[in-house]
Image: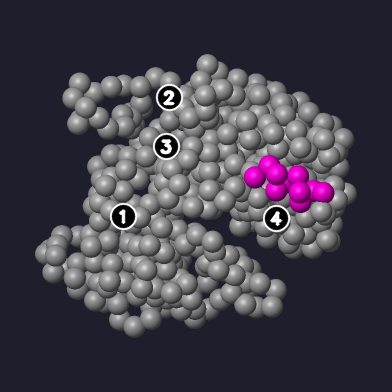
Amino acid sequence: MSVVKFYREEHQVPLEMHKVRVVQKLYLPTVEDRVKCLREAGNNTFLLQNRDVFLDMLTDSGVNAMSDNQVAASMQADDSYAGSETCNRLIKALKTVFGTEYFLPAHQGRACENILAETFVKPGDVVPMNFHFTTTKAHITRLGGRVEELVTADGLDPHKELPFKGNFDIPRLKKLIEEVGPEHVPFVRIEAGTNLIGGQPLSMENMLEVAKVCRENGIMSVLDASLLQDNLYFIKTREEAAKGMTIAEITRKIADAMDLIYFSSRKLGFSRGGGIVSNNNDLILKMKEFIPLYEGFLTYGGMEVRSMEAMAVGLLETMDEEIINQGPLFIEYLVKELDSYGVPMVKPAGGLGAHINATEFLPHIPSQQYPAGALAAALYIAGGIRGMERGSISEQRNPDGSENYAELELLRLACPRRVFTLSQIKYCADRVKWLYDNRELVGGLKWVDEPAVLRFFFGRLEAIGDWQEKLAAKFRADFGDSL
Ligand SMILES: Cc1ncc(COP(=O)(O)O)c(C=O)c1O
């Protein structure tokens, strides 16, 4: 791994291995306006208008910076409906990266999940996975299936500083298959860079072991490669067995072991769109008819051709260590900075963003008042920073209507790849520190409009009491006329 060392150790910071050539102007509303905007958005950061957001750390999805070569490639897109050269170039790039022959295009990751679930999940089926992702679970449960999460117990402990907290508990996987019977397990889903537990990676060894258990039981192995790029970086830097391997070699070793791979290109490949790849044509044929039905013709699957060209180049660039290390290095910097201030962080730093442990940040707020949601709202007031609640609000209620409290109440501060400068990351750390010092002012939230499905996207909440006005007043007292 190439590292640029600074002359003086105390000067060492992550160094951008790119330069900025297109910029977007940002605005930071006053703290009083931030309180108003938040109220109008129902205390849901998904409902804030981007013009009212200074640092958009909601997600890493579809907001990563593209390279000059990606933008250039998107200009030569072939718009033909059938036999498109763009599609051929993308298939070639996917073959280079994953070694796969067959490709089904889809408009994004959840569209692949929809097709997978429609094709393979029957009522009563069980789909084991290291951890669920919101849309994955919604598609499987919608079809009468059940999700079983088999991440090791360490993965759910924000304090355990272990390199691969996204790993499957292999004995539990074997036991589950034995208990329910392989005929009721349509596939095992391996989520690289486990999103909802802090972007924590799996080791290459663990992924290969899961695939082996699947083979032994005649069960299909499915890799969700949406967050594979960060995971590849962690394998390369943390796993002894991968030290001498290139990113491309690691990728091929993992891909060769899987029956099927799907991905969201909003993350993998710095583009938009998604797809399913495999070397098993029988599996592909089972899903194929759903593409023109739900997505678009087989040459574009609902994607815009310019994005497909950018994806082809982005996928190849993902094999470059100096490109994929930029996200994890900035996240690690932010996590270390906040950790040094005493802010409770999920450790070690993972991919896609820094994750604050809201349960420990706001111990006075009970789960019923959604500490992670409250923290997301408070940080917007503190700094115009838009994070994402990854706690109970992001869960679905149980079938009997009772609340399904999340195992971890996290505030995710996503670091879109190559988007923020280090001074913006430092600003974020500074505002979180101020909020931490004033955490006793933060109160809870309650629902005013709660949709039954994917409530975190469009549900509305309100502050319990007037804590948001008090927090803004304290900001004004501490920062004077600063924005
Ligand atoms: C691991 C994982 N899988 C699937 C998805 C769904 O992808 P998309 O947002 O493109 O639908 C995401 C999105 O964040 C994800 O993180």
The percent coordinates of residue 6 (x first, y second) are 24, 23
- What residue did someone put label 2 on? 322
- Residue type of the residue flagged with mark 4: Glu
Q: Amino acid at mark 3?
A: Gly
Q: In this picture, which residue range is highlighted in magenta?
A: 169-178
Front: mark 3 or 1: 1
Nearest the eye: 319 or 316: 319
Structural crowding at the residue carrying mark 1, measured as other residues with C-alpha within 10 Å and reported as few (<14), some (14–19) or many (≥20): many
Give, as a three-letter code, the residue at label 2.
Glu
Q: Position of residue 339 (x, y in %)?
A: 31, 48
Which of the pair 268/181 is nearer the observer?
Answer: 181
Badge 4 element: strand
In-front residue for pair 203/157: 157
Q: Earlier in the sequence, mark 2 or mark 1?
A: 2
Residue drawn at point x = 35 percent, y = 45 percent? 335
* Residue at image location 61% in from the left, 57% down from the top: 134
Crowd rating for badge 2 (residues with CA inside 10 Å; few <14, some 14–19, many 20+):
some
The residue that label 3 is drawn on is 327
Depth check, front residue: 189 or 327: 189
| In the rendered image, the vertical position of residue 432 relative to residue 377, given as above or below | above
Question: What kind of element bears circle 2?
Answer: helix
Circle 1 is placed at which residue position? 343
Sequence-wise first label, 2 or 4: 4
Sequence-wise, the earlier of marks 3 and 1 is 3
Whether pointer 2 and pointer 1 mark residues with C-beta atoms closer than 8 Å, the reply is no
What is the CA distance from the residue labelled 2 to the residue labelled 1?
A: 29 Å
Q: Are marks 3 and 4 in contact (CB under 8 Å)?
A: no
Disc 4: which residue: 148
Secondary structure of residue under mark 3: helix
